Image (cartoon, grey):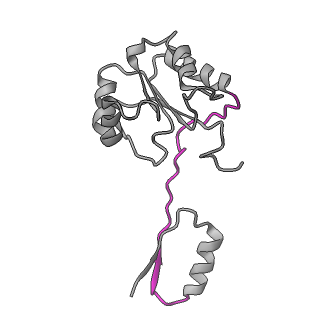
Amino acid sequence: DLVVLLDAGLDDTARYALEKWRGVDNGFAIYVNAHQPLKDKTAYLCRSPAEIIRLARELVQAGNRIAIVGDFSDKPGAKHRISTFVSTLSEDVKMEHIVTLHSGNSREETQQEIILQPEKHLLQKLEDGMQVFIASPSITAGWDYLGTEEQHFEYVLGYYPNGVLTAPE
């Protein structure tokens, strides 16, 4: 029998221990995930809402299409509101080119289409001129949008002020 261990957090020490435990027996295999998500990319660390809004404005003013994802809200009384981002970014981008997806609008037709078929509908939105996509927290379960060579987000900004989806530093 062949035993396959799949663990995204398998570090070199654990792998070494498993290889020693395995010995000369080929009863199980170890596959190393060498994916480097930030390879050839630049990462910025923003410590405040003002910083990330400033960075987002700089990026859209330069003609980039951006996605902002995170665990902020648009509920009344929320400290970090999506509507603040939309209001500020609308100074640089037409409102019809900003699309949001959050718990307050996730039942609307357009947002349901994006949730159910992100590849198809985000691609269509980009082709139609979308410059800013803001999503929170509707996508915390996770899904992928890979885009195409012509239609993609040049930058994806993560905004996690509440620590809900944030690993400790």
User: Does 136 sit above or below residue 81?
Assistant: below
Residue for point 65% across, 50% down: 167
User: Does 162 sit above or below residue 68?
Assistant: below
Q: Nearer the viewer, residue 151 or 96?
A: 96
Residue farthest to the front?
76
Please give left or right for residue 161 compared with residue 156 in the image.
right
Q: Is residue 157 visible?
A: yes
Q: Is residue 148 visible?
A: no
Quick check: is 29 in the magenta stretch?
Answer: yes
Q: Which residues are magenta?
A: 23-48
Q: Nearer the viewer, residue 83 or 31?
A: 83
Quick check: is 164 in the magenta stretch?
Answer: no
Residue 77 position by quadrant: top right
User: Does 165 sit above or below residue 63?
Assistant: below
Please give left or right for residue 97 compared with residue 135 in the image.
left
Please give left or right for residue 16 compared with residue 30 in the image.
right
